[in-house]
Amino acid sequence: MRILVVGPTGRTGSHVIDALRGRQADVAIRGFCRYPENRARSIEVIPGNADTGTKVRTRSIEVIPGNADTGTKSRTRSIEVIPGNSDTGTKSRTRSIEVIPGNSDTGTKSRTRSIEVIPGNSDTGTRSRSHAIDCLVGDLENPADRALAVEDIDTVIHYAPAFHPREAAMGTGMIDAAVAAGVKRFVYVSALHAQASSVPGNAAKLAVEGYLAESGLEWTVLRPQSFMQNIDVAAALDAGALELPFPLATRLGHVDLSDLAEVLAKVTFEDGHALASYDIASDEALGTAEIAALIATVSGTPVAAGEMSAAQLLAGLEAAGPGYAYVVGALGRLNAWQARNGGRGNANTLRWLLGREPGRFEDYVRRSLGVA
């Protein structure tokens, strides 16, 4: 089996790849990375986080040979765009673009080196990486890049970039590419209660789900709730406080990303999950003070609980670049929805799929701190 994981360099991707390798160590996995540079943090929230859209370019290129400005025919200067490309108006490149270390050419079918699965991410579920995958860096909105990504692939695992205004187009585009390439299976990670219209990304996820149901592919949809991994245990310890953008009385539902990854591997390798949609949720719901108390108990270090201000929440969102306004609005509406109902779900389906009880928040805290 040859599997394409769309987005292998974030938190979700790292857990998914670990789970796939755990099921079948020698399975052929290709990654399709949309970020052109390494990210130093593991939180997969804002497109463009950790300097994926920097303003500094180390080299300039001749964009249109022979044009100097809008009024003359000769060009005396070049403009600053993407480092490492010699000519955007021709089909040849004298150098490969600077993207993720270990990839030699994002525009060819061959790769001379593979990359470590998760460069620079802190919570992958393991302390070391012993394996690497073949990774294509491209544009999820570019049909040519999508076609290259799905070439010779049997199964696509797709989860959309969070808070992206063109999330639906990316998802339906990957479905089109999979159909055209003769892909057999398509596993789509949506969101719990995607029918809740007040959450901005849900309409996009429902559109992708509907498109997938009409595609003719053998599909499975997983709908997880918010992840435990959204809580940075180490950061809370360093700060001596845990602050979340909800009233302290809000009891939030979280599922362990490791459980989602285990289910993803299960529905990928096992028969019997075609044309099915599964809610992936824990029935544990904790308030900020309860989570802080868990961290304090496991670590032996006091951790206070507080409510994050709007200014704190918005700080750093400028990393979203042109999508700033969309991200601010989407995040605000999501948090308002969670404050109303806690994003809670029913654990029966997850319990059945795992064959055990879903992970508890204390398990996640202990694993994060390396405490048995």
Image (cartoon, grey):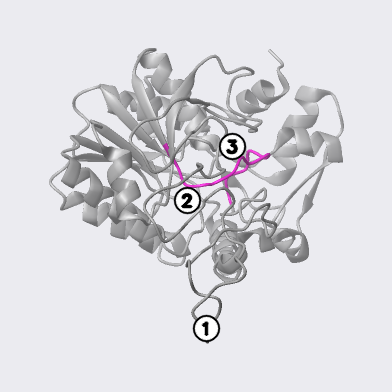
Front label number (1 vs 3): 1
Question: Mark 3 or mark 2: which comes first in sequence?
Answer: 2
Residue at (20%, 37%) from the top-left corner?
183
Q: Quick check: can you spot residue 199?
A: no
**Mark 3: which amino acid?**
Met
**Mark 1: which amino acid?**
Thr
323 or 272, which is in the foreground? Answer: 323
Which residue bears the numbered disc 3?
228
Front label number (3 vs 2): 2
Which residue bears the numbered disc 1?
72
Q: CA distance from mark 3 to mark 2?
A: 18 Å
Residue 36 is a magenta residue: yes
Which residue bears the numbered disc 2?
161
Residue 17 is a magenta residue: no
Q: Which residues are magenta?
A: 32-45
Work out whether 282 lies above or below 343.
above
Work out whether 318 lies above or below 70.
above
Residue at (45%, 47%) from the top-left corner?
93
Residue at (61%, 60%) from the top-left corner?
320
How many marks the image carries: the answer is 3
